[in-house]
Image (spheres, helix red, strand yellow):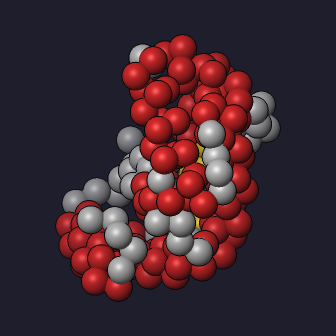
Amino acid sequence: MYDGTPRHRLLLADRWRVFAQSRQASAPVTILECCFLQNPLMKFVVQHDAAPSALVEHLSAIAEVLRPLRPMVLYLAPPDIEGTLDLACRERTAQWRDGLVSYIVGQAYGRARGLHGWEGVLGFLRHRSELERDILAQLPIDTVTIADDTAPQRWDRVETLLSAWLPPA
């Protein structure tokens, strides 16, 4: 369903609108992982090689729909993308790694740039990190970036930062 067409964008905006209306009455805080930024970015950019401006337009519309919820993006930016990815690979199967390589280098973005193998994945993920930060800076949504020394093995620090940000239970 992530094809980037105007129809697709309208359907997603409608789904986000229904979500926002349901959450407005029921929960002070909702935490969503990857569905606002990462999933659309991967589909728009990796699968369709869409221009970043199309993604900014799409995400700006979604941010506007979510405005009544006072959303905030908590962006976890690993300082060492290769080290973070290596850790993820140690925690997952070889099939996951192979699937990631196949997905990134085999889609429109990877083919258009002649990406190959693990180096192609790393190159894309470095680009994605820059692109995500650029996109977030353009969106009408508050963003907190946690980057400094919060490598995956430092989740205790991330948890402390999150606890300070979230309202008391």
Q: Is residue 156 left or right of residue 94?
A: right
State which quarter of the image contains the N terminus.
bottom left
Which residue occupies the foreground of this view, 99 or 62? 99
Q: State the residue at coordinates (39%, 50%).
A: 32
Q: How many marks?
A: 0
Which residue occupies the foreground of this view, 38 or 29? 38
Residue 69: x and y, percent? 39, 69
Residue 148: x and y, percent? 79, 38
Q: Is residue 11 left or right of residue 91?
A: left
Which residue occupies the foreground of this view, 166 or 72? 72
Q: State the residue at coordinates (40%, 22%).
A: 95
Q: Is residue 107 left or right of residue 155?
A: left
Q: Is residue 157 visible?
A: no
Q: Is residue 122 visible?
A: yes
Which residue occupies the foreground of this view, 131 or 18? 131
Q: Please say if 127 is above or below 120.
A: below
Q: Please say if 166 is above or below 20.
A: above
Residue 128: x and y, percent? 64, 53
Q: Is residue 153 left or right of residue 61?
A: right
Residue 18: x and y, percent? 21, 73
Q: State the residue at coordinates (71%, 30%).
A: 82
Q: Please say if 108 is above or below 85.
A: below
